[in-house]
Amino acid sequence: MKAFDFKGKKVLVRVDFNVPLSKTYEITDDTRIRMSLPTIMLILKGGGAVILMSHLGRPLKEKLLPDGTPDKEQFTLRHVVAHLEKLTGHLVHFAKDCVGPVAEDAAARLLMGEILLLENTRFHAGEEKGDTKLAEQMAKLGDIYINDAFGSAHRAHASTAIIAKYFPEDKRGFGLLMEQEVKNGLHILHHAEKPVMAVLGGAKVSDKIALIQNLMARTDTIAIGGAMAFTFLKAQGGTIGNSLVEDDKLELAREIIKQAEETNTKLLLPTDAIVANAFSADADHKVSPADHIDAGWMGLDIGPETARMFSDAIAQHKTLVWNGPMGVFEMAPYANGTLAIARAIATQTRAGAYSLVGGGDSVAAVMQSGVADDISFISTGGGALLELLEGKELPGVAAIEHGAKGRR
């Protein structure tokens, strides 16, 4: 991106402003917006004008009004304008559409050094369908296209991948955030200093199958926490009470355990868990052996012994990648395991290790622990990071490199 001459150019930038909002539409976590600032400010300092496009939520799927139209009050990007003005120190113009006369008129009026934010791209059904006509309309708005939305890079949507083919190779590129995201993801896959450890959590084994299998040949240790661990524990003959489990993935779990043995990868599973008699922060809870949980109780976090075991293992590795919480992190009684992992990774990073953390809850834990500055790289991507680490080609990346829509 630094090779572009932005002077006198209107630069169409696909950002990821899909930020969480409170019931009164206040931004509760502005990480994704702040991560886009270097790209925005570089263009402005280079004498260009910035036209921002993004999605927010899934307005055509999450909540439709009685007449079948999206709830534009809930999903409008206008909610972001005031905060973006505060962060950039610039007036932010807003267009009530991302294509058509309204958007084209707003773009035409935009002066160099100014910012224009377009309305939610997902108000148009063609966005998620990768509609070429919609992408072509979007492309009319700018002289240069920059994709800085890593969080959406695994989608072949109109604004993330299809649009790139309407710009010549010297007029399309990666933003500074996208560049760093891809660089750090590929570092884990191809240039990681050994020994390498992955800490994986979350609810379902099925969400992480490809990731586990791809990392198996690249890591020395894989620690598995979160609800997905109970599928592995049951596959080994453990009793897990009412804990979340994917019974149709038990054989797969056994295959992964066997694969770990064959590749000489150390696979760490919880030895104890914080269990509760209901899925609630107010439920009775206690420490239990992870593979001997009483009937009527469910595992909602790794236990203190497991947290120490995982932390001790982290301290023995030079490269660390973490994706997914160790428990129901949003409930205070079950957040300790996740927070312990955040602190352990930060400590080892300060000691010279390289660390990459990605996934909403993992990033939230790092922020809550106050150790964000000690992590080598914090990814804004969830699904995009997973697919990159799975070794898949991301459409949003392929589109910039080849001008095509990529894999999907």
Image: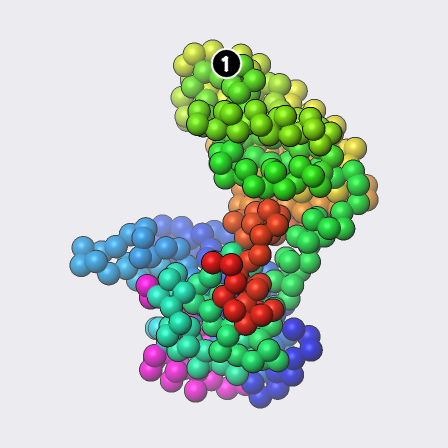
Residue 168 visible in image: yes
> Where are the magenta residues, as a range?
100-125
> Where residue 18 sits in the image (x, y, percent)?
46, 57
Q: Quadrant of the N terminus?
A: bottom right
328 w.r.t. 382: above or below: above
Q: Secondary structure at mark 1?
A: strand
Q: Quadrant of residue 54?
A: bottom left
The scheme the figure's colours follow is rainbow
Task: Kindly identify which residue carries mark 1.
Answer: 239
**Going 69% across and 39% down the picture, which residue do you hit?**
217
Residue at left offset 58%, top offset 88%: 8
- Residue at image coords 58%, 70%: 402
| Place of residue 392 in the rendered image (x, y in percent of width and height, measured from the top left) | 58, 52
Location of residue 315 with respect to 276 vertically, above or below: below
Q: 55 or 373, which lies in front?
A: 55
Q: Residues within 10 Å of mark 1 (few under 14, many from 20)?
A: some
Going by the numbered disc 1, the residue's amino acid type is Thr
Q: Residue furthest left?
A: 67
**Looking at the picture, how far across and down is residue 371, in whole percent?**
68, 44
Tally of numbered tags: 1
Residue drawn at x 53%, y 14% as measured from the top left: 238
Magenta segment: does it hold 177?
no
Horizontal side, residue 351 vs residue 369: left or right: right
| One can see residue 300 in this view | no
Q: 73 left or right of 188?
A: left
Residue 404's spot in the image, x, y percent? 52, 69
**Pick the front one: 222 or 59:** 222
> Quadrant location of residue 367?
top right
